[in-house]
Image: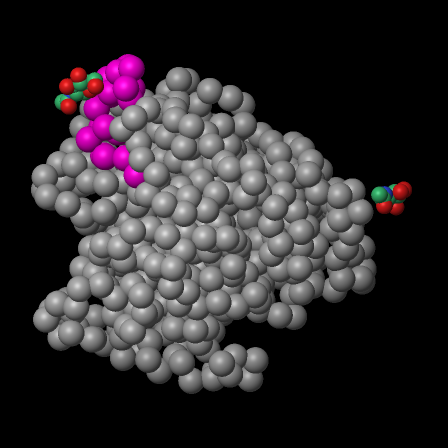
Amino acid sequence: MKTSLLVFCGLLGLSFRPVQPQAIDRRVGRLREVFAWKQLTYNIDGVLYQQDQFEEPSGVAVDNTRDRVKRQSGNLFFNNNDAETERNWNQQSSTNRNRSRGNRPSGRPLTNRPTTSTSTNRPDNVGGSTTTISPRDENGRFFVQYNNVPMGVERVGDRLFITVPRRRYGIPSTLNYVDLNRESNTLSPALQPYPSLQASRSLTSVYRTRADRCGRLWMVDTGMLEIPNNRQQIQRPAIVIFDLNTNQQILRYSFKDTDIPAENTPTGLASITVDITDNDCDSAYAYIPELTTFGLIVFSLADRDSWRLSHNFFSFNPTAGNLNIGGQRFQWSDGVFSITLAASSGDCKAAYFHPLISTNEFSVSTCVLKNRTASQDSNFWSQFSVLGDRGENSQCTMHDYHAGTRVVFFAEIGRDALSCWYAGNPLSAPNIAILAQDSQRLSYPSDLHVTGDEIWVMSNSLPRFGYSRLDVNEYNFHVYRANIQELISGTACEGFRTTANRDMA
Ligand SMILES: *[C@@H]1O[C@H](CO)[C@@H](O)[C@H](O)[C@H]1NC(C)=O
Ligand SMILES: *[C@@H]1O[C@H](CO)[C@@H](O)[C@H](O)[C@H]1NC(C)=O
């Protein structure tokens, strides 16, 4: 294991040569860029998909009715909207809306899609990058390259999982991976459906994944095609777990009606946090923040049961919702977004959480979350506390806690930054250190995850995609990594320096 890790790191080291002329500077602050894409491409069963493609690849069995219905459900008109939630659409100006709709590069208009799948596997030139596309022409298309915006990133061993939620048509697969060994010298690797194109069809739309220490990959499948103004609930929203050793799906737990109080609740199921005590894999809990209708869903794996909690701290702060990101000015209202667990002894951990639209950080004990009658207590509300305020423009998507250093890392959308806080200090703006910041290359850091002593970050320029147009000649999506010690060395986040820490650095 150790040897292969060294080999892996060595290979990765090679990849920081400027492999393409556009990629001369491969660092942003203390982050090292691993991959960057202008547009996503896919590698499906060895065939590269590098431009728009009408048809399903042949040779992939698509023989059951549910699959067919699911594909056809993509045959819908859409317009552009890429806020994290659809209701934000209503808040942007109609001028922006006009500007954002269907302005594809000019060229030959597309005609109807072929009615039968007679082609070979070769991605042909139908709908190439020099094509005018009116939205209707995207009906039923297998791959609409521009619509593929990566959201989640997570490294597990040699695989880097990358999710592409289905918020548009033409997304071949919502759960994908990159083989880090094979792609170590590639700047823009093609995504491979996980575990396969066919198996990935059981998933409708996934925002972010989380691996646990038991060799499992957890996620929420929202079950929803989130086409703006035309959402479709394809299947019940559910927790899905894959066994990373067998690459088989081992659980699909559909949420209860009481977990999903509104029709648009599934749009708020954007992340999941797994809680395992004493390496007891069978008794894991999962916490799912729900940002649209402001709740927190707790799942007990042992009991195959879930319950939903409410609290004012799950709501957004109305004074923190005016954003200016990537040249776009808009107002959002997303609630509780990310939960990270601070290490502690015993069953109870501190669960730190925040709404996306807020600069506050909050805390609650996992023992309160795991106690399914706790919310009936009249003092339930008082079990939650305000940790502090991270400072102006510090709105962030995901955050994660590194146990070895007791440092929490934040993916800040308001400041296009990666920041940190040493949990031994009070949470306040002066105790937050910015580790990397770039209005282009860290525009909308959409995911962040601590894996061992590394951090991995994705940025995806989402507001520009939603409210304007991505420039497909520029790098729009980036994946970064950094060693935790190197990242925080000499900053306000370097708390107690233990011998072990020095040895590691
Ligand atoms: C949007 O575009 C349509 C069609 O070009 C036009 O009629 C309408 O006035 C535009 N609206 C705005 C607000 O620019
Ligand atoms: C669960 O919460 C209830 C209500 O606060 C409390 O009475 C009970 O002791 C708690 N159970 C556990 C196991 O902590």
Using the image as rendered, state which of residue 376 and residue 445 is in the foreground: 376
Q: Quadrant of residue 280?
A: top left
Q: Which residues are magenta?
A: 363-380
| Residue drawn at the location 32% of the way across and 62% of the way down | 455
Q: Give residue 241's position: percent from left, percent from top.
A: 30, 39
- In the picture, measured across the screen, residue 464 lies left or right of residue 487, that is right
| Magenta span includes 1 | no
Ligand 1 quadrant?
A: top right
Note whether residue 52 is visible.
no
Note whether residue 358 is visible.
yes
* Up/down of 463 relative to 16, above or below: above
Q: Give residue 466's position: percent from left, percent from top.
A: 64, 49
Location of the C terminus by quadrant is bottom left
* Up/down of 1 relative to 141, above or below: below
| Magenta span includes 369 | yes
Location of the N terminus by quadrant is bottom left
Using the image as rendered, state which of residue 260 and residue 408 is in the foreground: 408
How are the residues colored? one colour
Q: How many marks?
A: 0
- In the picture, measured across the screen, residue 185 lies left or right of residue 6, that is right
| Residue drawn at the location 63% of the way across and 38% of the way down | 88
Q: Give residue 338's position: percent from left, percent from top.
A: 38, 43
| Residue drawn at the location 36% of the way across and 67% of the way down | 481
* Up/down of 485 relative to 334, above or below: below
* Up/down of 462 relative to 471, above or below: above
Using the image as rendered, state which of residue 120 and residue 349 is in the foreground: 349
| Residue drawn at the location 75% of the way across and 57% of the way down | 104
Q: Give residue 375's position: percent from left, percent from top.
A: 29, 19
